[in-house]
Image (spheres, grey):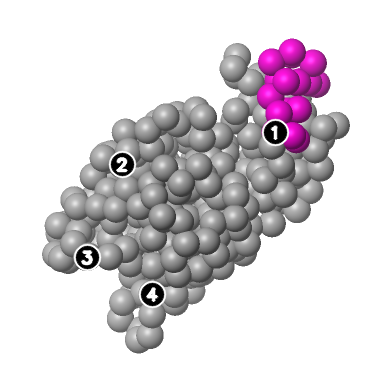
């Protein structure tokens, strides 16, 4: 299923994109798309049955904003340097274990919402990423099979980053990762049954119409199953938590000088095979 939330910011309603591409209203069945729903197999079953029967009301998608496809996110766990080609382009050695950092849940915005370039920024960068959404509480998982069984679905994430704040201003990466609007998510939460192999997805990103990233999750140093298993040994993962699993080569930081960092007025578009497409116009904060 392709689950989403539509409407003005803060007033989104749950919806479903059916197999024919028709937008359907879920508000008569469930109050929202959140961790509680993802952990409720009976509720998900009712959605599936209603979708298959064609009984869900149709929504007019004209001019309708897509919000983040997941409400009340608990935490956004991020994996750094998780693609072989990205590590090579930045001159970094491939890590022996996953690099973990966090984004605050309030950085998450809709897939086509405005992204704000922070005040004083000269190195705002782009990163298309596969987001993993957790559907069952995960603690000390032992196997890759067990890890994937705890995944509710997948989405497109844009891990916007300010490299000067991240690398040159002291402390951890958090300064360059948690600026407002720095995690567009969506348009859909695609349930795991529609993604049989998360290591066989293409990822692309364009800036002002120019292709910058053209990668595949097959290049991940630590595949999705290992990321979920590994993270569960350092923290409890709850339904509705999100893991951003890293970005392929092609970021501004990895390009020759003068590096083409983002500025107000730029337009970024990104997509992951089967998971939908995003488009953001950048403005000054």
Residue 26 occupies quadrant: top right
Task: Determine the CA span between mark 2 and mark 4.
Answer: 23 Å
Callout 3–callout 4 Cβ contact below 8 Å? no
Residue at x 53% of width, y 47% of height: 150
Label 3's element? loop
Label 1's element? helix
Q: Nearer the viewer, residue 207 or 91?
A: 91
Q: Left or right of 4: which side holds 280?
A: left
Task: Determine the CA span between mark 2 and mark 1.
Answer: 27 Å
Whichever of labels 4 and 1 marks the residue nearer the N terminus, that label is: 1
Question: Which residue does the numbered mark 3 point to in the structure image?
Answer: 96
Counting from the top left corner in percent of width and height, residue 127 is at 36, 53
Counting from the top left corner in percent of width and height, residue 48 is at 69, 24
Looking at the image, is mark 2 or mark 1 nearer the viewer?
Answer: 1
Residue 173 - label: 4
Span colored in magenta: 42-58
Whichever of labels 3 and 1 marks the residue nearer the N terminus, that label is: 1
Q: Mark 3 packing: few (<14 Cα in 10 Å), some, or many (20+)?
A: few
Whichever of labels 2 and 4 marks the residue nearer the N terminus, that label is: 4
Q: How many marks?
A: 4
Task: Determine the CA span between mark 4 and mark 1.
Answer: 37 Å
Whichever of labels 3 and 2 marks the residue nearer the N terminus, that label is: 3
Question: Which residue does the numbered mark 1 point to in the structure image?
Answer: 44
Q: Nearer the viewer, residue 234 or 75?
A: 234
Residue 217 - label: 2
Residue at x 22% of width, y 65% of height: 95
Q: Residue furthest bottom?
A: 170
Looking at the image, is mark 2 or mark 4 nearer the viewer?
Answer: 2
Looking at the image, is mark 4 or mark 1 nearer the viewer?
Answer: 1
């Amino acid at each position: 299923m392709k689950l989403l939330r539509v409407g003005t910011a803060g007033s989104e309603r749950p919806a479903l994109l059916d197999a024919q591409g028709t937008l359907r209203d879920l508000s008569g069945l469930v109050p929202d798309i959140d961790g509680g729903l993802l952990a409720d197999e009976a509720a998900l079953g009712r959605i599936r049955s209603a979708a298959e029967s064609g009984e869900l009301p149709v929504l007019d998608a004209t001019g309708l904003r897509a919000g983040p496809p997941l409400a009340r996110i608990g935490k956004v766990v991020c994996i750094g340097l998780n693609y072989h080609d990205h590590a090579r382009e930045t001159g970094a050695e491939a890590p022996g274990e996953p690099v973990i950092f966090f984004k605050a849940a309030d950085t998450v915005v809709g897939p086509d919402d405005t992204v704000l370039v922070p005040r004083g920024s000269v190195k705002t960068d782009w990163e298309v990423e596969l987001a993993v959404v957790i559907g069952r509480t995960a603690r000390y998982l032992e196997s890759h099979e067990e890890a994937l069984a705890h995944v509710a679905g997948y989405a497109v994430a844009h891990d916007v980053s300010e490299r000067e704040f991240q690398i040159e201003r002291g402390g951890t990466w958090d300064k360059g990762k948690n600026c407002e609007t720095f995690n567009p998510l969506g348009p859909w939460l695609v349930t795991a049954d529609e993604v049989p192999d998360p290591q066989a997805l293409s990822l692309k990103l364009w800036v002002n119409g120019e292709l910058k990233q053209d990668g595949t999750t097959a290049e991940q140093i630590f595949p999705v199953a290992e990321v979920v298993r590994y993270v569960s040994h350092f923290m409890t993962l709850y339904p509705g938590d999100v893991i951003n699993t890293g970005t392929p080569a092609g970021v501004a930081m990895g390009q020759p000088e003068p590096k083409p960092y983002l500025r107000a007025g730029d337009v970024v578009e990104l997509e992951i095979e089967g998971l939908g497409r995003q488009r953001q116009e950048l403005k000054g904060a």
